[in-house]
Image (cartoon, grey):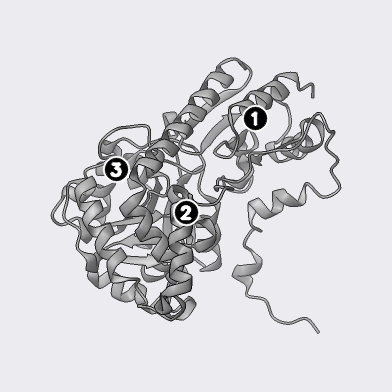
Amino acid sequence: MTLPLNPAMAATDPPPVMEARRWLQGAVFPPDRPLINVSQAAPVEPPPLGLRQALADAALHDDAAHLYGPVLGMPELRAEIASQWSAAYGGTILPGQVAITQGCNQAFTAILSTLAGHGDEVILPTPWYFNHKMWLDMAGVTTVPLASGEGLIPRAGDAEGLITERTKAIVLVSPNNPGGSEYPAATLAAFRDLARAKGIALIVDETYRDFDSRTGRPHELFTDPDWDESFIHLYSFSKAYRLTGHRVGAIVASVARLAEVEKFLDCVAICPSQLGQIGALWGMRNLSQWVAGERAEILARRAAMVGGFAALPDWKLLGCGAYFAYVEHPYPMPSDELCRRLVHEASLLMLPGTMFQPAGSEAGKRQIRIAFANVDAAGIAEMFRRLAALRL
């Protein structure tokens, strides 16, 4: 007997990173050509020693670190975020407008659960972050693709024509995953104005904001005294402080919206990880200079990616920033087939654009995402050497 399966779950694609890892099964990498894995955008090194010592101290001496905490997170962390974000963005954010989640993916699922249900619509620019699309599929929410323009920057004018009575939100990621593009402040303001005029939510995921190449605040959305009427901000501590295994993210939204979020979070996690929150708070208070060094290293790798593709004229660099380069390949085959061949013929693991575009997308067949955050300068140079030597 076969047990029932939710049709929406059955129709959801498998996780792309896990799917790509399965391509490695049975692969043999020559000693002089080890695997270069540029498939996943997550730190692989542990947090800095001071943060680990703070976690260890809390685990040993803070009994509360092992107990349930408030569903919306530690008051101290919520207050620190409100204070630092207010200063960084030039606006007013109150602690009650902040919620802590088990990573930014949970922040997304929680906020979308309060906004949209089966049969509703949400607009995602393409190429999209695959976990956003997966969650909408699981929830029975229709994803409406919004093609990005030059430099992989979406346009509010294009989105306006896609809005229907079923549309509940527009979701933007800046710096972008998978495209790497940094959205101009004017672009985000135009989307905010559109969302407000249409009575829908603008969700901006800034998981990679700590690696933005620009100086100063990246947008003016929080300077609006009524920002929480339509704008919702998401963030992750995983990248800045290497806390991937501790799962700490954040939502900044209206107090009323977070009261609805609390219902969702109480059912799926009860509370965020206490140790993870302790680590995030310690990082916010002590690691600003360390994060600046991490940012400088990522920007150096970004420059290496831009320079490398400039020397490969048959490839087209569509976007590059934060942890990602998004490119168009020159070969007469779809990108999913090409990426499988790259594993065996070049010892390179990359994700095809078919994982970031609607099914059947011709653009997706020509595109590849390269996550370079875990590849040093020597690794980047070797990757380009292998790409230049390809004969397919």
Q: Which mark is residue 188?
A: 3
Question: According to the image, label 2 marks what residue?
Answer: 238
The picture places residue 7, in percent across and down from the top left corner, at 63, 71
First in sequence: mark 1 or mark 3? 3
Tell me how far mark 1 sits from mark 3, CA to CA: 35 Å
Q: Is residue 280 above or below residue 99?
A: above
Q: Is residue 181 visible?
A: yes
Q: Secondary structure at mark 1?
A: helix
Can you tell which quarter of the image residue 34 is in? top right
Tell me how far mark 3 sits from mark 2, CA to CA: 24 Å
Q: Which mark is residue 138?
A: none
Can you tell which quarter of the image residue 377 is in? top right
Q: Is residue 66 above or below residue 157?
A: below
Question: According to the image, label 1 marks what residue?
Answer: 379
Q: Amino acid at mark 2?
A: Ser
Instruction: Tell us which disc is closer to us: 3 or 2.
Output: 2
First in sequence: mark 1 or mark 2? 2
Near mark 1 (Cα within 10 A), the count class, few <14, some 14-19 or many ≥20, is: some
Q: Residue furthest bottom?
A: 1
What residue sits 24% from the left and 72% below the top?
A: 256
* Residue sitting nearer the eye, 140 or 134: 134
